[in-house]
Image: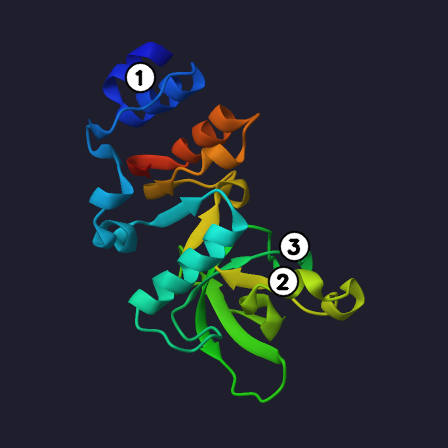
């Protein structure tokens, strides 16, 4: 059954090859592809439903680059920005790894940002009000003592996620930057997880 699926579905075939320890060659796999960084069309990245990487440093850098390409200069979230939730808040139905879009950000001089968010996949859906420390978006949140973080929700930009954060989610169209080298022991497992986040179309950038 699985092998029949693999013949019909290039993404399944790619995932099986990786799981069985084979290298993926550069080239086309049906609608999907393995492509070198030099050959990658930046538009391909911008049009994907989700971009995935391995390391947090890459995630932060690529999110900045992504927003720059969207002509967003404000270091803080603006209306339309895509955010990822970093911590559960059951009362507000916020879950770690959940993706949201900014509806509005209240004007404020303080370090705490108040925003109205809607679920990324249902922008017309129920709006949730959140209060987030501005430091979240500069990558410095880990340095702040837990007592000062605890009262607030935590978000970061969600255009680019780590594979680790994306577990349990799936998108039709994914661009995956292969950073499996950062996960020596579990290289194949990391790549397999990244590949299987894509339902219909996948570009792996090597």
User: Label 1 near label 3: C-beta < 8 Å?
Assistant: no
The percent coordinates of residue 31 (x first, y second) are 20, 33
Does any portion of residue 96 appear in the rendered image? yes
Helix, strand or loop at label 3? It is loop
Q: Which residue has dot 3 on it? A: 88
User: Label 2 near label 3: C-beta < 8 Å?
Assistant: no
Q: Residue at x 62, y 65 (%)?
A: 140
Q: Which residue has dot 2 on it? A: 92
- Badge 3: residue crowd in 10 Å (few <14, some 14–19, many ≥20): some
The tag on residue 5 is 1
Vertical comparison of 197 with 8: above or below: below
Q: Residue at x 47, y 73 (%)?
A: 77
Q: Residue at x 51, y 46 (%)?
A: 55
Q: Nearer the viewer, mark 3 or mark 2?
A: 3
Which part of the image, by quadrant, shows the N terminus? top left
- Badge 2: residue crowd in 10 Å (few <14, some 14–19, many ≥20): few
The quadrant in which residue 176 appears is: top left
């Amino acid at each position: 059954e699985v092998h029949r699926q693999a013949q019909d579905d290039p993404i399944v075939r790619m995932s099986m090859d990786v799981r069985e320890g084979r290298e993926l060659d550069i080239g086309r796999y049906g609608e999907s592809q393995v492509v070198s960084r030099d050959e990658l069309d930046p538009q391909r990245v911008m049009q994907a439903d989700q971009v995935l990487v391995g390391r947090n440093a890459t995630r932060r850098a690529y999110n900045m680059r992504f927003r720059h390409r969207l002509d967003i200069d404000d270091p803080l979230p603006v209306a339309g920005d895509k955010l990822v939730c970093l911590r559960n808040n059951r009362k507000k139905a916020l879950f770690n790894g959940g993706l949201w879009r900014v509806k509005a950000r209240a004007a404020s001089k303080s370090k705490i940002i108040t925003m109205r968010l809607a679920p990324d996949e249902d922008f017309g859906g129920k709006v949730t009000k959140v209060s987030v420390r501005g430091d979240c978006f500069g990558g410095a949140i880990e340095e702040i003592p837990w007592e000062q973080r605890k009262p607030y929700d935590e978000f970061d930009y969600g255009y680019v996620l780590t594979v680790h954060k994306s577990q349990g989610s799936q998108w039709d169209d994914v661009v995956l930057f292969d950073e499996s080298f950062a996960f020596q022991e579990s290289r194949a497992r990391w790549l397999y997880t990244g590949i299987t986040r894509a339902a219909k179309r996948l570009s792996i950038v090597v």
